[in-house]
């Protein structure tokens, strides 16, 4: 399911990028046909409608709109047929390489960490602490574990690359107004981060919220983690900290990318405090 989610996100990113690539084409029918939702085709269909037509008429299924629907319904049928044809009933699906056979285990040899029967067992002396310092240590360790697992996984890196691709598309194809090049000022960079990551961050937070909450159950260790000697608020707070860390890491990567864009285009009046304000308290609309 993890890679299914990433595939859906990649689809939306490529869809958005394709809309940027086709928005300035003279042959507008190309953009109308390449839009899988049909929104661009509808826009072309009603481009010169009057107010009366907007208020009382529906677009007819003709012309570019008909061609668009026929094209993408055909693609959908083809993908559905491929999914049924390539489906495998086993859980592993496609196996690119054979797994190595496990080495034979000598039943007579003692397992590592297992004390032989009859041997004295020495347990370390421990003291269970329940004060504020102990709770802080528990929260800090568990939050670091959750954050490290979220940031270090391949899915986050893939989604980060896709998010930076969105920001690049906004900067590349939105750098001019009426044919005039615009200076890459910080306000524009923050708007690019907003346009490239606004909805994207919602998807990431929603995805990782489900992954973090259900992780213990999916790994079948929920009963063990529920028996930990810590309050219920600590696992919840640690997961919230991990989600916050994901957002901060994503925005920081976007800020570094846009700063690099400014420097590479000869703009050196960098404003780190404005970046901090824009990313922390909202996107500035004016400067």
Image (spheres, grey):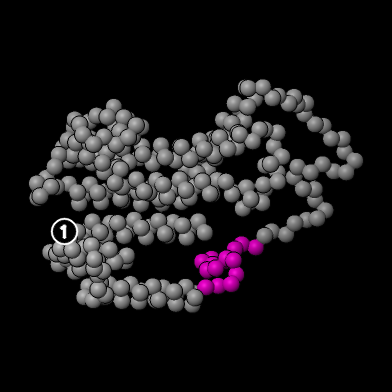
Q: Determine the main secondary structure of the stretch shown in magenta.
A: loop
Given residues 164 and 35, the one toward you in this image is 35
Q: In the rendered image of this protein, does residue 67 appear above or below residue 26?
A: below
Q: In the rendered view, does 246 fall on the left or right side of 188?
A: right
Query: Judging from the image, what secondary structure is the residue with disc 1 in?
Result: loop
- Please state the extent of the stretch shown in magenta in the rendering: 87-101
Q: Residue 274: x and y, percent? A: 27, 29
Task: Report the quarter where the C terminus lies.
Answer: top left
Decide if residue 172 is on the left or right side of residue 141.
left
> Residue 180: x, y in percent?
9, 46
| Residue positioned 46% across, 51% down in the render | 155
Residue at image mark 1: 24
Does residue 54 lie above or below 128 as drawn? Answer: below
Q: Is residue 97 above or below residue 156?
A: below
User: Residue 165: x and y, percent?
Assistant: 31, 51
Residue found at x 50% / y 35% = 241
Answer with the quarter of the image where residue 59 lies.
bottom left
Indicate whether residue 96 is drawn in magenta: yes
Residue 47 visible: no
Whether residue 124 can be seen here: yes
Q: Nearer the viewer, residue 198 or 93?
A: 198
Q: Is residue 179 magenta?
A: no
Q: Position of residue 150 (x, y in %)?
A: 50, 44
> Is 41 left, or right, of 235 in this rendering?
left
Pointer 1 local density, CA inside 10 Å: few below 14, some 14–19, many at least 20: few
Check the image and name the residue furthest to the right: 118
- Of residue 87 and residue 191, the one placed in the foreground of this image is 191
Q: Residue at x 59, y 72 (%)?
A: 89
Residue 56 quadrant: bottom left
């Amino acid at each position: 399911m993890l890679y299914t989610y990433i595939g859906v996100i990649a689809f939306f990113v490529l869809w958005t990028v394709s809309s940027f690539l086709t928005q300035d084409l003279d042959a507008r029918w190309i953009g109308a046909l390449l839009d899988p939702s049909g929104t661009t085709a509808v826009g072309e269909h009603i481009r010169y409608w009057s107010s009366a037509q907007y208020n009382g008429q529906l677009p007819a299924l003709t012309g570019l709109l008909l061609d668009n629907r026929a094209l993408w319904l055909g693609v959908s049928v083809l993908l559905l047929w491929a999914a049924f044809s390539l489906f495998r009933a086993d859980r592993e699906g496609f196996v690119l390489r054979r797994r190595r056979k496990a080495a034979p285990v000598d039943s007579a040899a003692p397992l590592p960490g297992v004390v032989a029967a009859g041997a004295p067992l020495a347990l370390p002396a421990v003291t269970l602490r329940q004060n504020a310092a102990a709770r802080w240590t528990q929260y800090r360790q568990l939050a670091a574990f959750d954050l490290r697992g979220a940031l270090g996984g391949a899915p986050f890196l893939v989604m980060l690359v896709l998010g930076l691709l969105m920001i690049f598309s906004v900067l590349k194809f939105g750098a001019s107004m009426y044919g005039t090049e615009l200076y890459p000022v910080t306000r524009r960079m923050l708007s690019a981060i907003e346009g490239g990551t606004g909805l994207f961050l919602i998807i990431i937070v929603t995805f990782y919220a489900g992954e973090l909450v259900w992780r213990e159950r999916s790994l079948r260790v929920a009963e063990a983690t529920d028996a930990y000697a810590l309050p219920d608020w600590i696992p919840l707070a640690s997961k919230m900290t991990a989600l916050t860390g994901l957002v901060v890491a994503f925005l920081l990567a976007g800020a570094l990318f846009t700063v690099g864009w400014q420097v590479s285009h000869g703009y050196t009046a960098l404003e780190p405090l404005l970046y901090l304000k824009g990313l922390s308290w909202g996107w500035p609309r004016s400067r």
